[in-house]
Amino acid sequence: MDAATHRFQQARRPTFAELFTPKLITILQEGYGWAGFKADVFAGLTVAIVAAPLSMAIAIASGASPERGLTAAIVGGFLVSLLGGSRFQIGGPAGAFIVLVAATVERHGIDGLLLATMMGGAILVAIGFLRLGTYIKFIPYPVTVGFTAGIAIIIFVSQIKDLLGLTLPAGEPGPLHQKVMALGMALPTVNSHAVSVALLTIVIIAALRRWRPSWPGILVAVAVATIAAALLHLPISTIGSSFGELPRTLPMPHLPPFSSEKILAVLPDAASFALLGAIESLLSAVVADGMTGRRHRSNCELVAQGVANIGSALFGGVCVTGTIARTATNVRAGAHGPVAGMLHSVFLLVFLLVAAPLASFIPLAALAGVLAVVCWTMAERHAFAALLRSRGGDALVLLATFALTIFVGLTEGIVIGFAIGAIVVIKRMAEAAGVEAHSPLVMEDKADDANGQRTAYDAQPASDPDIIVYRISGALFFGAASSIGSLLEQAPTSYRALILDFAGVPFADATGINMIAGICRTAARNGARIFLTSTAPDLRGSFISHGIEPPLVQFAPAIEDAIAAFKRQP
């Protein structure tokens, strides 16, 4: 394959099949044998052991019943693996959604939650088919750390009631500051038995993570806490006492009640579900890629996440997204492909059919202890501290996102944090752009000639008072156009040739090109000849489309070529 063909293949747009073929089909086309199936069975069982208590805990913390979390993991998780663009993604209810789901349930009830979940799924499908998945991954890292840490704080506060076994006479308020005040007033009702169960759960999980990391710490901790509470007849709340016995079958699929007014009412929540779901699922897929060296299909993954949310809501489940912890567990357990995720859902279904009555004995304090550990992991303390010490605006983006997530809302935190991050990047790019006048090319900047030799640049012609040379460096975009334009406009008017070199310009937007057009027209009115040198093909095409073309300007390969052309025909 020659270089030209290779460049063509790199530039070719991927086909629809290349973008949206599920990884399951790719695995089957590669050849799927008994060894791969055995690896997927073990990995799927391992993930199911982790997912069962976690899915119930997340659903309860979200203001829903525990079976809705299991339903989401069973139906949604199966569809994510069946249709997704990642080999190892595990779908299910995620801790990051607790805040949004709880707020939606409080405002619109369970039916409103299911409708918002379906609408969010439809939005995700649209985002995927519009091929916007590539751009969602551009969320700045400080924004991701900021809203994740903010969510961790909110979730932990929401678990204090069950961690301490508190009794709130008027229910738990939604806003964080009101919730903290209500919890503070209820401190005299602390249940020491609940505290002991929660601490036991946390200690077991932490101990197993340290000394037996291959063991299913969450399941072991919840099982030990449940057995202890049952044998000792501890007076604490359990799943059974709070929600009744879990159903032993999946419900029949049905549409939630809806109307035009209801659709408009839950639309903001649906958009929030779609935004967070897209970010979380693609982050999880990227983590899996980093652990395995594979590459996921972003847009295919988003379509699968959308279908999974629609399916989950049809069966009464909560929101579904890619879950980083369970996906990483799947990889570490040796999964071969998407069949592991599908089997994880099958094993959860078996748990629901066979062991649902046993779940009634699980203490809520134990599940709160599980979520406390999840919050500790979610907070990304080391990354948070590192970003606080960083310079250049990253700390500002982090703190703004963190504070807005806690005190205003998750969506506002992400959007405003992204906006501040974009402004910081624009400022950095503008500061990096510059203009260098009458600067001879040094040896390292000189392109090789046809013989592969480097020739010295003669600086003497560039010192001619009739010639002025400007070398522009950095991105020529709206953030830098004003400062660069001001420098170029300060040039003396006595020159007869203006040479603008673009060898150091990676790209230019309409604002920057319009500024160059104004400079060129001003120079032409002053009787000067204008040469544009070292313009890449795309940049030259943009110049021409904006009217920067002969006879207004002349294009030359390099500065010395422009000087020679001027000398030949002054």
Image: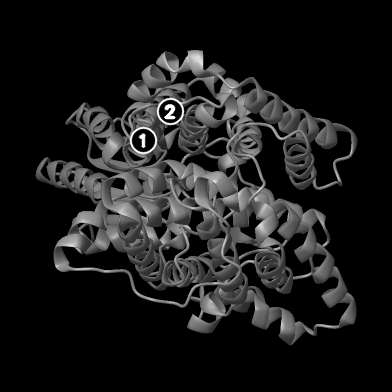
On the image, the x and y values in percent for residue 549 come to 23, 60
On the image, the x and y values in percent for residue 257 come to 27, 69
Give me the residue at 39% from left, 57% from top. 274
Write down the residue under mark 1.
413
Give me the residue at 22% from left, 40% from top. 496
Describe the element under mark 1 as helix, strand or loop.
helix
Residue 80 or 166: which is nearer the viewer?
Answer: 166
- In the rendered view, would you say 27 is above or below 345? below
- In the rendered view, would you say 446 is above or below 8? above
Circles 1, 2 touching at the beta carbon (< 8 Å): yes
Q: Distance between the residues labelled 1 and 2?
A: 7 Å
Labels 1 and 2: the sequence-earlier one: 2
Give me the residue at 50% from left, 28% from top. 161
What's the coloring here?
one colour
* Corner quadrant of residue 421: top left
On the image, the x and y values in percent for residue 481 come to 26, 37
Residue 304 or 41: which is nearer the viewer?
Answer: 41
Residue 452: tell me if it is visible.
no
Residue 418: tell me if it is visible.
yes
Instruction: Specify whether 133 is left or right of 10.
Output: left
Instruction: Tell how many labels.
Output: 2
**Mark 1 surroundings within 10 Å by alpha-carbon count, few (fewer than 14), some (14 through 19), many (20 or more):** many
On the image, the x and y values in percent for residue 489 come to 20, 31
| Amino acid at circle 1 | Gly
Write down the residue under mark 2.
402
Residue reaching furthest to the front? 233
Describe the element under mark 2 as helix, strand or loop.
helix
| Amino acid at circle 2 | Phe
Residue 420 or 328: which is nearer the viewer?
Answer: 328
